Image: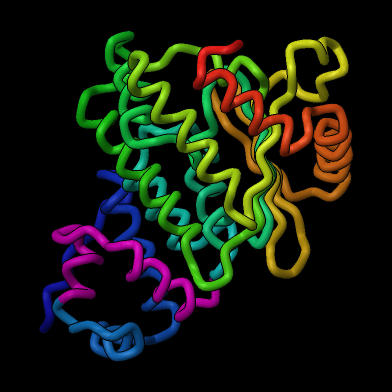
Amino acid sequence: MVNIKELNPEASLQAAFGARLRRMREERGWIQDQVADMVGCSGRHISAIETGRKPATLPFARKADRLFDLIGSSESFERQWQEMKHGNLLEGFPEYVGYEGRAVEIRLFQVGLVPGLLQTPEYAQAVAYGDVLRGSITPAQANERVSFLAERQSALVRSRPPMVFVVMDESCLYQAVGGPEIMDAQLQRLQEMAALPNWIIQVAPFSLGARRAFNLPVNLLTLADRSIVAYAESQAQGHVERETSSVLPMLTSYHQLQGEALSKTASVAKISQLRKGTL
């Protein structure tokens, strides 16, 4: 008689992932070898994930989503994997990133800091280690955040890259992060990205005042089926929104902000002038 190990899904996020995989497999009457054949691994590997001896990878989570028809679902294994790997991130953000990697259009608004998708590694490291100095995260978590950001940036480099619209509050250009050399390299990165055909970068000048549509960072994603996902965050938490009644007003406000912001040409000129020290 096979001795089946009892699982405790509350022991850890990794244990919860494995226990859920076993439960969904057993609900369908499949043995481990059957699942292994369908996702392209060994039955021993499935056993190791189910019992928590081995962590699942992102490719495995995505294969499991295809197998159990969970792609794009709020209950997807990919979302659970993101939460497992990036538990120190704001609530809702791992779910958002899952959508971001599949978006055909990305719209961003940022205050104070250059948006993550545009950050150089050095700038991102300086931002993350600012949180370390404040005691809010550990050095290991800071390194994890920087690596995670690099993965997000890499996900946008594909055969049909998304169209990315960015509106940055002018404060993003003046907030000193990591010293003069890091800031100069970051501004150069903005110039380089603005030259790409799938990036539109605009600056919302201080002179907008109360006409600026948002006071907090906002992310809007258009998916292949033309549905829209919004993500907004406060200091303590993030929230993913898919309800049309909530998302469409945000999209309208974003379009209004684009109309009020400097043009792409004027925005790049401002960045260039700042690099030259003429502002």
In the picture, residue 228 is in which quadrant? bottom right
Residue 248, percent from left and from top: 86, 45
Vertical position of residue 56 compared to residue 138: above or below: below
What stretch of residues is rendered in magenta?
Answer: 45-70
- Position of 5 with respect to 265 (left or right) is left
Quadrant of the drawing holding the N terminus: bottom left
Q: Main secondary structure of the magenta part?
A: helix
Residue 173, percent from left and from top: 56, 19
Vertical position of residue 111 compared to residue 223: above or below: above
In the picture, residue 247 is in which quadrant? top right
| Nearer to the camera, 148 or 17 | 148
- Position of 219 with respect to 44 (left or right) is right
Task: Report if residue 252 is visible in the image.
Answer: yes
Q: Residue at x 51, y 49 (%)?
A: 97
The number of discs equals 0
- Position of 151 with respect to 118 (left or right) is left
Q: Residue at x 28, y 38 (%)?
A: 144
Q: Residue at x 33, y 53 (%)?
A: 16
